[in-house]
Amino acid sequence: MKGDATALAEAIRSGHLTVGEAMTASLDAAALRSDLGALCHIDADLGRRGAIAADAERRTDPDRFASRPFCGVPTLAKDLGGPFAGLPVVAGSRLFSRDGANAPDSDLGSRFRAAGLLPFGLTTAPEFGLALASEPAIGPLARNPLDPTRTPGGSSGGAAAAVAAGIVAIAHATDAGGSIRVPAACCGLVGLKPSRGVMPAGPAFGNHLGGIASELLSAVAGRTRGPFADVSLVEPKAGPLNIGVLCETGFEFPTMPERSAAIEAAGQFLEARGHKLVPIAWSDVATMAAASARLFSDIVATNLAVLSETDGIDFSLAEPMTQAFAKRGRALSAATFWRSQTSGVLVSRNLWRLFDRIDVLLAPMLATAPPPIGSFPSDHGDTELHLNRMTSLAPLATLANVSGFPALTLPFGADADGLPLPVQMFAPLGADRQVLSLAAMLEQEGRWHHRFPVAGLPS
């Protein structure tokens, strides 16, 4: 049986286990793997109440229960984004208290529940998502299940660690600068940053960050009700595709040879199945990548500058790096920010031009192996050093966020240390299913095997 959330849902739907049994298995797994620091908040009672209600629905209204894509599957929300009623999100920060941090379901949260997903906790994220590691000063420190001396990535590192360890089969995540894809790549998972406008971001739109942030689950997509146009997913193209292959990321932030080789191998695999490969040079995307990174940093800085001036918030409690980004944002002129915004528009236009000659772009996700714990410290104020460290790990991460295009990562092999060799695929706006289709094809090659079984899933 395939070890994912759809398989767990089918096991529940077919009566191989109850929702209560699935929830108990996830709660037990969370306790057993507490050493990973993947979860920063657990509400076992919330999970059990949800499971009892779901099992009751299966008895009283089996058709409605069975119609939910993830009927009774336990899940976790990220400590950033959402929110999900009953789960006190504090964005990994001392600025807020879990005792007072609660809100009703966001549009996304209510759709998760309607799809049958049952959240019972929050996953660890860095303060305000500011790192490609998940080590907030308030704790806990998230570790990679594949090698606990290394990071599971960020900012959805706790989510990726929880899924990779089998605590849950699926978890909520957000992506404003690679924050879904980097952790997925670090932990050997599939992670998709969806097209802008596909996922709901309301009702307050508090996590859209000028349009660069996304939260994912295809079962809850559509009818987004703003603030951006409701983008419809298009069906994958039939027949051979033109697949652009980019194996390098330039001399400043180079991709290691074994990771470039994984891109080449994935391209050759797809070519053997009838697709045409189109070589893409770093010079074709370098300007777009640099402009994306610059706009990302400006949006994050101005966002934190506004937060720092919010009444009732003692911003002195924030980590030094967060305070430094807020200071950077306050110093940013309107003209400089406008130039970054304009460059971001040109990123979307120029990426569209690249897709005039290709259907999908295959490119590196991580330039190196997941770095050791402590590689993204937040106890200093050098924002440029921090940004360079993130770009060195994932040189193309922000391109998808700024352009709005979908991007997916998945593992395609393992390195000498048994860590995943991830590849990344970009597609035009709305073509999320195209990269999902190709990812399914690459998965069939079986070059990566998940190390830990999903809690509760029958063997």
Image: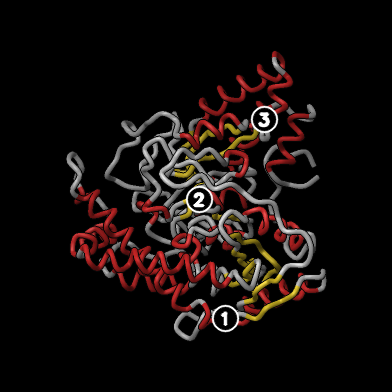
Question: At 35% across and 52% down in the image, what residue appears?
Answer: 127
Q: Closer to the camera, 228 or 29? A: 228
Per the rendering, the mark at residue 68 is: 3
Give the amino acid type for the residue marked by disc 2 in the picture: Gly
Question: At 45% across and 73% down in the image, what residue appears?
Answer: 288
Q: Distance between the residues labelled 3 and 2?
A: 26 Å
Give the amino acid type for the residue marked by disc 1 in the picture: Glu
Residue corresponding to mark 2: 158
Vertical placement of residue 189 versus 31, above or below: below
Answer whether residue 266 is visible to the viewer in this image: yes
Name the N-terminal-most of marks 3 and 2: 3
Q: Closer to the camera, 253 or 168? A: 253
Name the N-terminal-most of marks 1 and 3: 3
Residue corresponding to mark 1: 248
Residue 121: where, in percent of width, then height?
Answer: 50, 37
Whether label 1 touches label 3, CB < 8 Å: no
Q: Label 1 crowding class (10 Å Cα cut-off): few <14, some 14-19, many 20+?
A: many
Q: How far apart are marks 1 and 2 (CA)?
A: 29 Å
Vertical placement of residue 115 versus 369, above or below: above
- The quarter of the image holding the C terminus is top right
Q: How far apart are marks 1 and 3 (CA)?
A: 42 Å
Q: Residue furthest top?
A: 60
Q: Residue 299 vs residue 354: left or right?
A: left
Residue 449: where, in percent of width, then height?
Answer: 73, 59
Q: Label 3 crowding class (10 Å Cα cut-off): few <14, some 14-19, many 20+?
A: some
Question: At 39% across and 46% down in the image, what residue appears?
Answer: 207
- The quarter of the image holding the N terminus is top right
Question: At 40% across and 69% down in the image, what residue appears?
Answer: 293
Give the amino acid type for the residue marked by disc 3 in the picture: Arg
Answer whether residue 416 is visible to the viewer in this image: no
